[in-house]
Amino acid sequence: NPRLYSGMQPSADSLQLGNYLGALSPWKRLQEDHDAFFSVVDLHAITVPQDPSTLREKIRRTAAQYIAGGISPDKSTLYVQSHVPAHTELAWILNTITGFGEAGRMTQFKDKSSRYGTDAASVGLFAYPVLMAADILLYQTEVVPVGDDQRQHIELTRDLADRFNSRFGETFTIPEARIGGNEARIYDLQNPTSKMSKSGESPAGIIWVLDDPKVNAKKIMRAVTDADGVVAFDRENKPGVSNLLSIFSGLSGRTVEDITAAYDGQGYGAFKKDLAELVADTLGPVREHANELMADPAELDRLLARNAQRANEVAEATLDTVYDRIGLLRRA
Ligand code: AQP
């Protein structure tokens, strides 16, 4: 089976609906016919300030949501990034072949550093995409399923792999991004032109996977729409309704055309009510299962340790080749 890698940051108490639709649900499908590695990227999360007293809990909660969302720790390798030291070791090496200007062009860095201010933005935040390249390349990954916002980072990963291969000899597989349809970019419910994000600012605009299903249903009912009352997909002129259609389609597996036809001439009320139910019915069981897993952290830690062992074996093999290619003296 083709090798697949992806990950998410444990940067909040819960994942948000964009993480669920743009990443977790495609992962679940893809693990069936891929040799999949899914990591909780804790080292990425600390590129912006995290509270040490809650970070550990967030790491476990993220892993629990992977499992509750359908990732099988027997079929797939599900582990915590920092449990595999090769990620940081390879990242350092890739840093040395990454251009300063090249890294500076990453739009995610520009967005996040403007939020924190240039002085508060760390070198780690700047190097974030290089660590991500290391994550992917260590596993000789062929397929990287990510949301649309990660397109530029995958391009950089491909460039770095290609550069390394031509400078030092064939070492890395060149990975391909697998980006979904409409559901690959979910927007904030209150501000439907900016992406839904764990670090987003509007509490009413973010659907949290682990939130009370009733609260999530209410947020859908209150989502921003427009005055014309027609359920139609038009990202430019009807960003709110289009976003709700993406969510509906992503959760139900129905096409946008099918959904717009079903609500033709009915206004937004019935459409929102059905979507609110769909969101609550989909995320409710994920929340319950995640809470069950969280109730036994020792068992969760054991599972993560077992999976990290497998990840380490694959990652160390790549790192050995890398050290050899660049002429380092590998520790005996
Ligand atoms: N709004 C979104 N729509 C579709 N996909 C999304 N993803 C994130 N937001 C959306 C996808 O989720 C995966 C993991 O993301 P991450 O946790 O590594 O970091 P992120 O992309 O920066 O996600 P957030 O929620 O916005 O986190 P913060 O606020 O901490 O930066 C990726 O595959 C991403 O595409």
Image (cartoon, grey):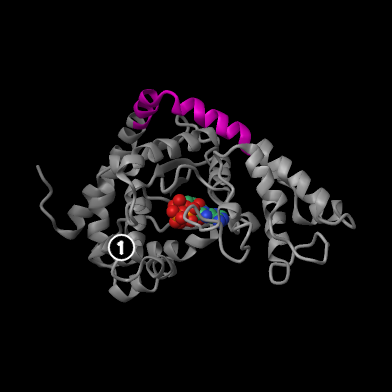
Seen in the image, is 150 located left or right of residue 324?
Answer: right
Q: Residue at x 61, y 31 (%)?
A: 285
Snapshot quadrant of residue 48: bottom left
For this view, does 158 lie left or right of residue 217? Answer: left
Front residue of 240/222: it is: 222
Name the spot of residue 222 as percent of width and height, x first: 70, 53
Q: Amino acid at mark 1?
A: Ala
Whether 33 is drawn above or below 324: the answer is above
Which corner quadrant holds the C terminus? top left
Is the magenta region chiefly helix, strand or loop?
Answer: helix
Q: Position of residue 4 (x, y in %)?
A: 45, 46
* Residue 275 lies within the magenta run: no
Residue 221 screen position, x and y as percent: 72, 50
Q: How many marks?
A: 1
* Span highlighted in magenta in the image: 283-304
Residue for badge 1? 127
